[in-house]
Amino acid sequence: MRRVILVLVLAVVGAGWYGYSGSRIAFAVNGTSVSQSQFRAELRAFESNPGLFCYMSSLANVALAQRGAGNDTVTAAGETAWANLRVEGIAINQYVAVALKHHPSAAELASATVSLEGELSQAAAQTSNTCAGTPAQALAAMPAELRAAQIEDQASSVYLVSKLNATIPLTATAIKAYYQSHQSRYDRLCVAVAVVSPANVNAFGASQAQGLSVAALAKKYSVDKSAAQGGAYGCFTPASSSYASVRNDVGTTPVGHFPTTPQSITYNGGTYALYVAPTSKSPTPFAQAQGVVISDIQASNATAANSVKASILYAAAIALDPAYGRWGLGSNGPTIFAPGLPPTSGPATTAQLTTASTTPYQ
């Protein structure tokens, strides 16, 4: 739960940095501050413990440190990312304590410790990081004050999510009920694709309007190797790693039809139009769909949590040492932006900005 909360929202009202500058703080949330010395101790812990660095980088979804011959060195981007997570955690904890008048019990803190360890493990898996040691060992490597704060923030986050009317509990009964209400979202999908050069998009559309079948369109216009089989690309179940992408690409397109508006795809170094048609759909048993159902529920809960936390944080007063960045409004709400630094090398090339693909789904 906490990872959902941590990565989503923050906000600022009033209180500027200058009112706090004499106290040598790194940042403050509604008057609750973390000192420069405390924040530096946290960063040194990341530098000296590879396991802690790995797990918390996974949680933040950004490398907090630069690997070196000796200890790691926390990067400027890492400092900003970690400051963001700390500010978010404090703001959520304050809201639960003040607005909801709830303080975690000893039992809740114990449960939150297990929950946080589980989320660290899940974050590492989702980011494909193989971390040294266990999440419990990573928490043990934290400075005592930080470890206590992280566990309390986790407990407050879990409590907050439990109070949101829009969230769906991750219980066996609720998960099964969600699946039954959205069963068509978990169909086994067989699809055909057509990868069309920009020069042929208009002709493809004209042939499509004339009623050419999916197979005929793919054979005539697609540059993908599947064209020889009429674009047939395979079938995907919820257990497939590509299922979410396929499901998104198919959308509400009727079976046996390509959409009229293509997507853009980088194919063999060039930009092409991608058309994806569902050729058949069949129900998937709950046992096979359960993992994707849980992911969908988590995403739905995250959206609900994001809305509530945005309201919380737009009403928070944030003070930030400019060395760690500036507070501003980003696409997902207020956040800390990294300090503006000149580039260390020339402008990024097209090759750095574009990832070539040879197949629509990998």
Image (cartoon, rainbow, N blue to C red):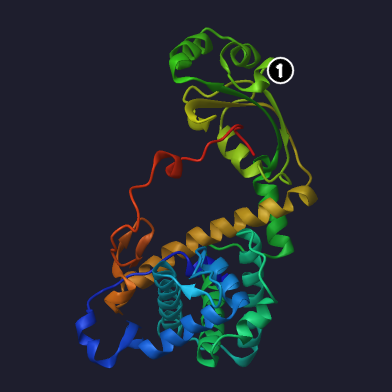
Q: Nearer the viewer, residue 306 or 200?
A: 200
Could you tell me residue 326's position as x and y percent? 28, 69
Residue 15 showing in the rendered view: no
Relative to 35, residue 122 above or below: above
Q: Nearer the viewer, residue 313 or 147?
A: 147
For the point 70% across and 38% down, which residue is it? Answer: 187
Could you tell me residue 139's position as x and y percent? 61, 83
Residue sitting at the far front: 69
- Residue 186 falls in image quadrant: top right
Residue sitting at the far top: 210
Residue under pointer 1: 229
Could you tell me residue 306's position as x and y percent? 45, 63
Residue 313 showing in the rendered view: yes
Residue sitting at the far left: 18
For the point 65% across and 89% down, which residue is it? Answer: 107
SS of the residue at dot 1? helix
Asked if residue 115 lies left or right of residue 274, the reply is right
For the point 65% across and 42% down, which residue is it? Answer: 242
- Residue 2 falls in image quadrant: bottom right
Q: Say which quadrant the C terminus sits in.
A: top right
Structural crowding at the residue carrying mark 1, measured as other residues with C-alpha within 10 Å and reported as few (<14), some (14–19) or many (≥20): few
Asked if residue 21 lies left or right of residue 84, the reply is left
Could you tell me residue 76's position as x and y percent? 39, 70
Q: Say which quadrant the N terminus sits in.
A: bottom right
Relative to 351, residue 176 above or below: below
| Residue kind at label 1, given as amino acid type | Gln
